[in-house]
Each structure stands twice: as C-alpha cells, then as structure tokens.
Image (cartoon, helix red, strand yellow):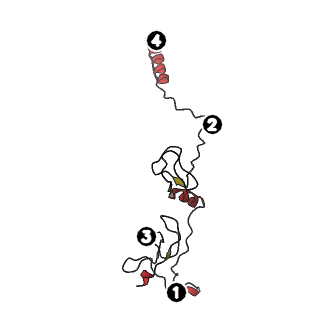
C-alpha cells in the first residue's frame, strides 16, 4: 500500500510539472517598436512607401495622398484640447454681455465658415477644416 501511494504521488507530481505552460519569453529591449506616421501615403498601400513630402509612390508610381493621421498624432501629443467657450456665462462680469453668438449653421443648414477647397462641413468660426486642414473662410450665403 505504501508503495502504491508513493507511485501515485510521483505520478501526480510528474503530471503537474509536465502540464505547466511556458509563457513566451521576451528579450529585454526587443519591444521597442516606434510607429512612424508618414505625411503622405500611397493610396494602394504599397510596402515601403510614404513620405514627408508630396510625390509619387516608388512602387506603383501613383501620386501620394495626404494622410490626415499625420496631423492627428502631432495634435494629440500636446494633450487635451482647451477650447474657450463662446457662450457667455450668466452673471459673468465681462464686457461681452451684449455680444450675440451666432450658431455654426443657419436655419437652412448653411455653415457660417466653409472650406475654400469645398470639403464637406464647416464651422461657426474660422478654424481649420477637419478634412484638409485649410483655414475656413467666411460664407456670405450664411447671412442670406
């Protein structure tokens, strides 16, 4: 009986050690990948293409397209966006109490400021276009 218990114990010990999963080992310093976002990219997503200046893809020879993600990465590095409110607070002691704040779109859905490149959308102030990055220009049709 003692011998049987000894064999059973050794067998259990053997199973518990042999079934242990090995985790993948990481080599220190090997996980230092850096993501580089190119300003201009190939529309065909060719390998080893993209540039910081406009041009043609060296693989398929098509013109590069503008990569909006390039600006998003730079934009987000500066931290959270701090936008001043254009709505006066009630009982505030500023001189802007008589200022009328106009909405971004009028009753007909026309934006106050639009992109000179005719990109979709607009804004209530002369900010940058969310599609191409150009500064929005005043739209006189907003006041009609």
Query: Of circles 1 and 4, which is in front?
Result: 1
Precedes in sequence: disc 4 or disc 2: 4
Query: Circle 3 is placed at which residue position?
Result: 121
Precedes in sequence: disc 2 or disc 3: 2
C-alpha distance separating marks 4 and 2? 49 Å
Query: Circle 4 is placed at which residue position?
Result: 2
Query: Of circles 3 and 1, which is in front?
Result: 3
Q: Residues within 10 Å of mark 4 (few under 14, many from 20)?
A: few
Residue sitting at x 52%, y 86%: 99
C-alpha distance separating marks 2 and 3? 48 Å
Give percent across and percent down for residue 142: 43, 81
Give percent across and percent down for residue 41: 51, 52
For the N terminus, which image quadrant? Answer: top left
Q: Residues within 10 Å of mark 3 (few under 14, many from 20)?
A: some
Residue sitting at x 49%, y 48%: 61
Q: Are marks 1 and 2 in contact (CB under 8 Å)?
A: no
Query: Circle 1 is placed at which residue position?
Result: 99
Query: Circle 2 is placed at which residue position?
Result: 28
Secondary element under disc 4, as helix, strand or loop, is helix
C-alpha distance separating marks 1 and 2? 60 Å
Precedes in sequence: disc 3 or disc 4: 4
């Amino acid at each position: 009986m003692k011998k049987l218990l000894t064999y059973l114990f050794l067998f259990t010990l053997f199973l518990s050690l042999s079934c242990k999963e090995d985790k993948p080992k990481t080599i220190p310093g090997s996980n230092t990948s850096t993501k580089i976002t190119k300003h201009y990219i190939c529309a065909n997503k060719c390998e080893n293409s993209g540039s910081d200046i406009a041009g043609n893809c060296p693989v398929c020879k098509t013109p590069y397209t503008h990569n909006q993600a390039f600006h998003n990465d730079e934009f987000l590095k500066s931290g959270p966006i701090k936008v001043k409110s254009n709505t006066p607070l009630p009982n505030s002691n500023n001189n802007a109490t008589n200022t009328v704040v106009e909405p971004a779109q009028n009753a007909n859905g026309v934006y106050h400021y639009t992109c000179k490149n005719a990109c979709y959308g607009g804004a209530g102030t002369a900010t940058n276009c969310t599609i191409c990055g150009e500064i929005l220009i005043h739209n006189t049709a907003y006041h009609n």
